[in-house]
Amino acid sequence: MDQPAPPPVSVRNLAAEPPGLLELFFAFSKMSLAGFGGVLVWARRAIVEQHRWMTPDEFNEAFALCHLLPGANIVNLSIVFGGRFRGIPGSVAAFLGLLLPPTLIVTTLGILYSYFGDMPGLQRTLNGIACAAVGLFLAVTIRMMGPLVKRKNPIEIGLMVAVFVAVGVIRAPLVAVLLIALPLSIVATYLWRKRAAA
Amino acid sequence: MNPPGLGTYLNLLWTFGLMSLLAVGGANATIPEMQRVAVEVNHWMTNAQFADMFAIAQFSPGPNVLIVTLIGYQVAGLTGAAVTTFAMCGPAGVLAYFVANFFHRSSHSFWPSMIQASFVPVSIGLMAAGGYVLARTVDVSPAATVVTLVTAAVAVGTRINPLWPLAAAGVLGFMGFV
């Protein structure tokens, strides 16, 4: 497959070397094994903050696409991310790294849980972990808002808040919200870029 | 339970492959549909069993989509677990690969780059909504809410390894504070 695209002009200390196949496999299995209550927290930390394989904006765009396409977001992200750097073998390496270790663990836990699931101490511990896991998820969401807040595009921020209210507070059906919000967002981005170019 | 035949595997493959292509907004948005298919349509398990599997998948390391691994295991053993996991992740992943490749190749042309950028505020709004809904589900006491908010504040404000707040919250939970 093709080489990584030449970086845009406004470059920003990214890693010099794109990740190799083994590196992809192990990076994604590490994120995955750390990912109690969701892998996104660890994926952004590894990709943007530790390895510097993507800028915050690049990560947001790659994730947004994986998020709005069907399927599990983080599984899609592993495939898209691996593919961008190493083509189809890269996708396979990242995908297997993400899924193989936790699949073995979740199956083992499933078998164990059928014996020990009723222990009250275990339930209490898991409840505590769940609260912190949600906190971590909120934190990664806030970090991903960073580039939007810096751009100060009022329509972009307004749309983000509107989607939050519609889906989170009003609990409107997801498909309806997307059918309204995506075209609006495309028009808003178009006008904003045209204005910036003028 | 009879040993699962080829028909069982094909059913799993078809059911979850199709579901993955309809699963817009991530695995957690698909939970109600999974519950309907596994409990009501196919009678693979009871509601209580399904709830247990959801909890295990949430608390296990790895993507939350792995609830389908547990469903597959319940239906048809280890092979069922593998078939179901592949069906849920494969077709959607292939689609994502080609769509993302298209956008990336044409990332210097006007429309594709603009469309991709315009997905971002919608995606982050959806994430915030998901976090809010999750928080309302797990934060059933003031102490639980405090744990969530303090974890969020610490994770935004510092570069601490996220395993520490997770472990601390697990200990607090075990001692009965949450």
Image: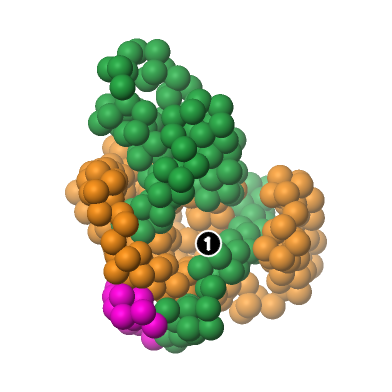
Chain colours: A orange, B green
Badge 1 amino acid: Asn
Q: Main secondary structure of the magenta part?
A: helix
Residue at the far top: name it: B6
- Relative to A172, B109 lies left or right: left
Residue at image position (43%, 25%) is B12
Q: Residues within 10 Å of mark 1 (few under 14, many from 20)?
A: many
In the rendered view, tell whether residue A93 sits above or below residue A147.
Answer: above
Question: Disc count in the image?
Answer: 1
Foreground residue, B20 or B121?
B20
For the record, the magenta segment spans B158-177
The image quadrant where one finds the C terminus of chain B is: bottom left
**Picture coordinates of residue B129, whole percent (x, y):** 63, 64
Residue A184 visible at all: yes
> What residue would you read off at disc 1?
A60
- Relative to A150, A144 lies left or right: left
Foreground residue, A125 or B154?
A125
